[in-house]
Amino acid sequence: KGDDEMSPMRKTVLALGGLVLSITAAAAYYGWRKAGDVTTIWVVLAFALLMIPYFGLGFDPIVEALRGLGRASRVRLTMMGFLLLIPGVIVLMSGGGHISLRNMVVLALYVSVPILVLAGWGQAGPRPSVVDLVVLMVLWLPVELQYFERFWDLPAGNPSYVLAKTLGMELALFCFVVVRRLDGVGYRFRLAGEDLTVGLVALAAFLIMGIPTALGTGFVQFEPHWAGPGKWLLMSLGIFFFVALPEEVLFRGLIFNILQRLI
């Protein structure tokens, strides 16, 4: 019985480990191709630690374990939130950026204030409140305005360039999925049978409208060339995980979700 109860968590940990190792290896390879070398082992370590909550918050057993661990303890929830800062601190301490007391205080407030507000004044249940919307704006606006990007003055080939946007997405997920316990966000690393079909149909529908619009407005120019399978794969992974997914989580999963339920 004990083995049966642990098997879902074991499967989750194995899946999480595979995702983290795969995407970290791809990022390290990208950094090596871009800059000629992997700048430092600390950068790769920071990137791997950044990916653990990125993928972990997409698995139900891990979310439930975090909810149970932080239940009825604002201090414990806040300390778990501070763990999200570890990758950025590693990069700063290893010489990847400029560290200052002011920057660290701002980051600490950015993490702790939303958690404490939701834990103290946020309501339970599926219907969101104005407090939820205000907290979400506090989390989203610094990311949208690129405020935190100046904290990490990194070279272009460094794979940890995604720190700011990924931190914002992970913190928003932690606040609303773990602290606020808001269901229906839709952040799950679990493919259903129809997902590929739906994705291809949606992609085709977008391309039919998007390509003529982009060409007609001059947003893109028609200059096709083949960059090779390796670069194509790395760019596709980078766009998916660090541009498309964070924006979908923040906009559709949280902002649109909360507005829809409020209105």
Image: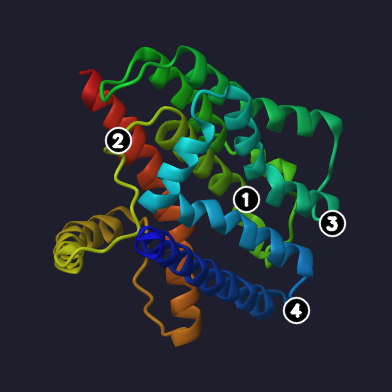
- Residue tagged by mark 4? 37
Judging from the image, what secondary structure is the residue with disc 3 in? loop
- Residue tagged by mark 1? 163
Reading the chain from its start, which is encountered first: label 1 or label 2?
Answer: 1
Q: Provide residue 148's location: percent of width, then percent of height.
A: 65, 38
Q: Distance between the residues labelled 1 and 2?
A: 26 Å
Point out the image quarter for the C terminus. Answer: top left
Task: Give me the residue at 44% from left, 78% from top.
Answer: 232
**Residue 94: mark in rendering:** 3
Q: Verify CB contact (< 8 Å) between mark 4 and mark 2.
A: no
Question: Observer-nearest residue: 184 or 33?
Answer: 184
Q: Is residue 243 depicted above or below 132 in this figure? A: below
What is the quadrant of residue 40 in the picture?
A: bottom right
Point out the image quarter for the N terminus. Answer: bottom left
Reading the chain from its start, which is encountered first: label 4 or label 2?
Answer: 4
Residue 58 appears in the figure: no
The amino acid type of the residue labelled 2 equals Asp
Q: How far apart are marks 1 and 4 (CA)?
A: 20 Å
Judging from the image, what secondary structure is the residue with disc 4 in? loop
Q: Which of marks 1 and 2 is in front?
A: 2
The amino acid type of the residue labelled 4 equals Asp
Q: Provide residue 199's location: percent of width, then percent of height.
A: 20, 63
Task: Give me the residue at 30% from left, 60% from top.
Answer: 190
Question: Observer-nearest residue: 49 or 77?
Answer: 77
Q: How far apart are marks 3 and 2 (CA)?
A: 38 Å
Count how many numbered circles sit on residues in the image: 4
Residue 18 appears in the figure: yes
